[in-house]
Image (spheres, coloured by chain):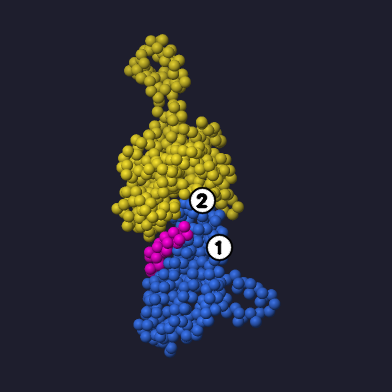
Amino acid sequence: MILIIAGATCREALRSRSFLGLLALYCLGIGLARVVGWISPASDDVTTNLVLSLQSIVGVLVAVATGTALVHTEIKQRTLYTVLSRPLARWRFVVGKYLGLAAALVVGQGVMLGLGLTWLGATGAPLHSALVVAGLLTALEVLVMAAVALCWTALTSPLLAAALGLATYALGHAVATLPGMLPYLQGWRMTVAAAGASLIPNLGRFAYRNDAVHQVPLPPAELASAIAYGLLWIALLVTITVAVYRKKQL
Amino acid sequence: MSLSAGSVSDGIPDRLLASPTRAGILSASMADVLAFTDVSFSYRGDWLNRIRSLDTVSFAVPAGAAYGFLGANGAGKSTSIKLTVGLLAGQRGEIRLFGQPVGDERLRARVGYLPEQPYFYENLQVHEYLAYLGKLSGLRGPALRTAVDRVSELLDLAELARRKLGSFSKGMRQRFGLAQAIIHQPDLLVLDEPFSGLDPLWRARFKEVMAAERKRGATLFFSTHILSDVEDLCDHYAVIDHGKVLEQGRLDTLIGAAPLALTARGARPEGAEDLGDGTWRLLFPDSERGARLAALTASGAEILRLERKHIALEDYFVARVRAFHAAGRPMEATP
C-alpha cells in the first residue's frame, strides 16, 4: 500500500509544472555560475562550488515548496477522500506520500547532479568522485528538508510552514558552527545552547561541497554516520507528522 | 414510485454488469450493512468552541437496500457519510459497518465512496488513476485491468483513458468519481450527492449504473437534496435536519400512507369535493376503504374511479422539516 501511494505521488510530483520550472531555474543558475567563475581568481573552483550549492538551494526550495503542499493540498482539495476511504491506515498514507516525494526529489537531484557535472566537464572544470559524494549528501540534505517541511505543515499553516522550513534550513547550517562556539559559553548557557541545537537537524553534516571542490577526502565512517544521522531525522519527523495526521479531522 | 433495479439497469449491456459474486452473498447474510446508534459529532471550531453537526443520530441501512439520505445543505449528511468511510472519527455513540465497529480500516475494502464535488490529482491520467485506486482497494493483475476497462466503458471514460484529470469538467469528474467508487465491486456504495453537476442524460446513466450495482448485490446509501432521485431509486429513506434524523422508514410505507381518492357521481356525501361536472371526489384513508365503498354503494352513488393520491416527496419533505422547525424538536420516527 505504501509503495502504491509513493508511486502515484512521485508521478504526480514529477509531472508538476513547478518541479520542471525549478529544474529550468537550476539550468539557468549553472549557466550563470560559469560567468561568475570567469570573473573570479580561482575560476574552476568557484564555478564547481556554485554548481553544487545551486543543487542544494534549488533542491531545498523544491523540497520546502512541495513538502508543505504535500498533504495539506490533499486535504484542501479533498483529493485524499477517495484514497483514505479505502482500506488504508493514515500512517501508511503519510509515509507513502513522503516516500513518493522523496523519490521525486531523488530523481530531481540526480538530474541536477548529472546536468551540473556534465556542464562542469564541458566547460573544462576538473571532475572527480568527491563531487559525486558531495552531490549525494546534498540529496540527503534535501530529503531531510522535505521531512522538515512536511512536519511543519502538520503543525501549522502551509505558508508559515514554508517560512519555518526555510528558517530551519538556515538554523540547521548555523548549528554546524556551534561546536566551535560552545567553549566560549559558560554554565547553563552551554547546556541551553547544546539542548537547543539538538532540536534542529545539523545540516552541516551534509555540507561536504566545499571540501569536495578541494578534493579533501571524506572518511567512510563519517559518510556512514552522516547518512544514518539524516535517516534518523527523517524517521523522527515523519513519525511526528503521522502522529498529528492520525487524529486530524478531514 | 420507486423503480425496480431491473427496469433501470436495462440500458447497460450485460457484458458490463459485474456478476453477483461475493458482494451479494456476504450482504445477504447480514441484517444491517450500516447502523448508526445515538451518534453525535462535533467539529472543532475556533479555540475551545465546538460546532455540533450530529445529535444522537440513529438509523440503519438494511442489506441490499437503496437508502436515500435526505436533507438540506448543512443538515449533517456529509458528516454522517465521512464518519462511515473513516474520514472523520471521534464521534459519540456507535457506528457499525457490516456488523463491526467502523474504526477498522479493513472494512473499507467492501465500501465504495463518491465524495461530494470530487477532486482528483490533476497530473494523473484516467487509466493510471483508476488503476491506482483499484490497487488500493486490493485489485491486482488481470482482475485490475478488467475492472479498469469495465468501469471505463461503463462511464464512457475509455476514450479519455490518456487524458489527465486536470482537464476534466465537473460532470466528467463526477463520472470518474463513480467509476472509482465501483471499480472493486463494493458491498456498500456510499455516494454523497452523486447527481451533482450532471446533465439529464448522465443523471439517467448514473441511475442505471446505481441500479445495476444494486442488482449485483450492493447496498446503496446516498445523500441528496433532490427528492425525485429518491423516488426513482430508493426503497428506504431518512430525513435529517440540523443534525437530527427527523424520520426514516420504507418509501412504500410512506406512499402507502397516502389517502385514497374516489371519484363518483350521484348523492354527494359530507366532506366530498364538488368537481363541477356533476361528479365529486372524496379522500379517505385506506383503512376505511371497505366501509366507505359499502356506504356509497348503498346510497346509490356511481363510482367512476378509485386511486391512491400521489404524495409529492418534495412537498412532504418541506412540510416535515418546517414542522420540525416550528416545534423546535425532532418528530417521532415512522416505522
Q: Dot 2 falls on which chain?
A: B
By secondary structure, the bulk of the magenta-drawn segment is best described as helix
Q: Residue at x 52, y 40 (%)?
A: B35
Same chain? Circles 2 and 1: no
Total numbered badges shown on the rendered structure = 2
Q: Nearer the viewer, residue B157 or A87?
A: A87
| Residue A13 sits inside the magenta stretch | yes
Left or right of A93 on screen, residue B125: left
Left or right of B167 on screen, residue B114: right
Say which element carries label 1. Answer: helix
Q: Residue at x 43, y 72 (%)?
A: A109
Q: Is residue A207 above or below residue A76?
A: below
**Closer to the camera: disc 2 or disc 1?**
2
Distance (Cα) linking label 2 and label 1:
20 Å
Tell me where residue A84 appears, x and y as whole percent: 48, 53
Which residue corresponds to mark 1? A239
Q: Colour of chain B?
A: yellow
Q: Dot 1 falls on which chain?
A: A
- Region of the chain picked out in magenta, as a range: A1-21
Which residue corresponds to mark 2? B105
Q: Amino acid at mark 2?
A: Glu
